[in-house]
Amino acid sequence: MSVCYALRLDEIDYSKVALCGGKGASLGELVRSGIPVPSGFVVTRLAFDAFMAAADPEGRVTEWLAELAAGRTTAGETSKAIVEYLADKPMPLDVAAAIESGVDDLAASKVSVRSSATCEDGTASAWAGQLDTFLDVAPNDVATQVKACWLSIYHPRALAYGVAHGYGHNQFGVAVVVQQMISSEVSGIGFSVHPVTQEPDLRLIEACFGLGEAIVSGAIVPDQFVVRRGAAEIVEATRGDQRRGLFLEADRPEPEWRELGQRGAEAKLTDAQVLEYARLLDQIEAHYGFPVDTEWAWQEERFHVLQSRPITTLAKEYREAIVDTSEPWCRGMRRPLSLLEASIIAHWADSRHSGGDFGFHADRFLAIEDAAGLTNMFFGARAFEASAEHIRTLERTDRARLVALLERGLEIYRRGHEQIELGESFASFDEAAERLVEIGRYTTSFPAMTLMALEAGHIADPRVCELAEQLRSHSLYPPFVGKLLDPMVETWAAELGFSAPSRAPQLVTWRELHQGSVDRATLEGRLSTVEDGYRFVYQVLADEERVDFVSETGYLIMREAGARQLVPPDEPDCISGMGAWPGVHRGRARVVLSSEPEGYELEDGDVLVSIQSNPNLMPLLRHAGAIVTDEGGVACHAGIICRELMIPTLIGTGRATSVIRDGDLVEVDTIAQVVRILERA
């Protein structure tokens, strides 16, 4: 029985993923389901195995990989040894014959040759951009490029990615996809679920002039389109200023960059084309039964799907309606607050405690804990706008009252500080709550809203500014809760027999304490959930209170902040971009101007600032606390990788490497879609 070294795409389905790799099996599935895919065949993993058996009979490669897995050598050193050892090893004759037969049957003048690792494009890891792809390959050169694809599994970036995702040295092989080359004028990416906000009813499509490699390599800023499910509505569209494109030129061995000039700012797709591809996305997702990340090309008035793989970065709960969206939310502050502290803010801002002096209240409140353990607060948009208008009205019509409210806050601050110093306690939770309502309203909420009005230019009163800044520069609320209320809660939890009383403020709300509605079993259950890495989502909707603990919250924060793609304007020392993974991280900048990692080192937590999000930088990405790039779109390879690694990533800034200096202290805030320079090196 002959060994199957090559299979046509129409002979392949997902049952052959171990033989044809993730990319090959997926393309076969697409062909069988009627999706337009360029003709081609797959050089199977058996061909790779035959080459390795002939080239390395003593198992030296396995030994080198074991050394890497044990941490006794680096990815760069291991790669150099393996690639040099295998480079001159010949391909077995029967494998070469199978490739030649496949090329002859395809009868294409030029082809693409793309790696398809057997652990690639799975539901857990995408291996995006880690292995090699060769475009515009002549038929006589296919076997040479197939071998190059095999060796790319041993490149430093692929080895580093495999280590980061827990793959052992014998857990992967390489198949290779050979297809008719599509020399497209317009190419792009399509996600059937928005990869950043994870809104299941929204698709994200990116488009560029030239080959799509320009997008996936992160080398340009593409056009972006957000389309509602069913392809009936383009919700948002952003025109990327594409300065150059990657094109195939006649009689040139590789694609070349071409300057686009003013053409780069033109639309890459018509609305009708965007909606047509959105319908294709719906069709592909329906066939697979899970959300997909696709690559496409437009040639001869039709779309050609070049790749489809699962979106590997979606939270388990992304389809669940966790946050109430009956009314819009307005983002407030981000602070280090426990669940208890966040719930008390909702308590003092509601209609029973605000109004009156304040002229506004918030009966809708949302608090989401992020991966850094900080709490992101949102208020109902109408209440937020009402508070700003109330302060503007006070400044215009009753300045004395505005000043008096702020001065009262200073007096409350002085009395509260004395109470903390004296260690005075409370007789009951209710007594503590009423004191906290006063503190929160006058020393926290009101001065904060006043400062927002000042910063927005709605009011410009020096005395008002002085008082508000004085109050906000020394917050009373956190130490008051931490030193006076938290000990009461810990004592209460201990009396319940809870195993970790000091953790109780992270697990209980004020309303639950007041109503006595939480028992020991509830606390133990929540503690177990939190120790498994879950974060809280807390909501107050009029008289209803909701507490959820979920596996991931970054996408919820991006979703409620409306950070789908719109880029805010730049300001001095504040550079805008597109958020590819949510989060806020502060660290020293490490500016890397090369697409190769050699010669650069990152300390854990450094911020990697680079021209483009090149997958070659994977050995550095493993140490980065955040990433900022000049170029790239949400769908670029490294954007996918950073979502898998859950590193806050800001891409497409246009100028980060020219403004940020090596060693600068920066804060990457992908929720606000900016990087701030806090301190110059």
Image (cartoon, rainbow, N blue to C red):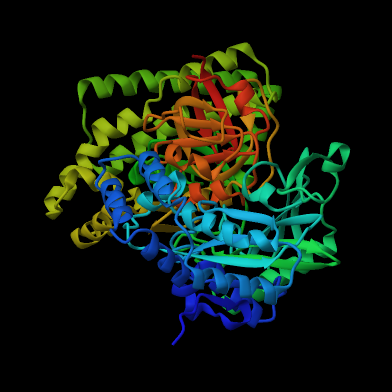
Q: Where is residue 513 in the image (x, y as percent from the top left)?
A: 28, 51
Q: In the depicted view, which residue is nearer to us: 20 or 471? A: 20
Snapshot quadrant of residue 473: top left
Is 632 placed above or below 302 here?
above
Q: Where is residue 39 in the image (x, y as percent from the top left)?
A: 70, 73
User: Is residue 232 something one can see in this rendering?
Assistant: no
| Outermost residue toward the bottom in this view | 1
Q: Quadrant of the N terminus?
A: bottom left
In the displayed structure, does residue 108 sit left or right of residue 364? right
Q: Position of residue 550 (x, y in %)?
A: 40, 58
User: Is residue 573 something one can see in this rendering?
Assistant: yes
In the displayed structure, does residue 530 sit left or right of residue 212? left
Marker count (numbered): 0
Q: Looking at the image, which residue is at 53% across and 54% down?
A: 148
Q: In the depicted view, which residue is nearer to us: 268 or 48? A: 48
Q: Looking at the image, which residue is at 28% across and 19% down?
A: 418
Q: Where is residue 290 in the image (x, y as percent from the top left)?
A: 54, 72
Q: In the depicted view, which residue is nearer to us: 307 or 224? A: 307
Is 288 placed above or below 266 here?
below
Q: Looking at the image, which residue is at 41% across and 30% down?
A: 602
Is 434 placed above or below 67 here?
above
Q: Looking at the image, which residue is at 43% across and 44% down?
A: 156
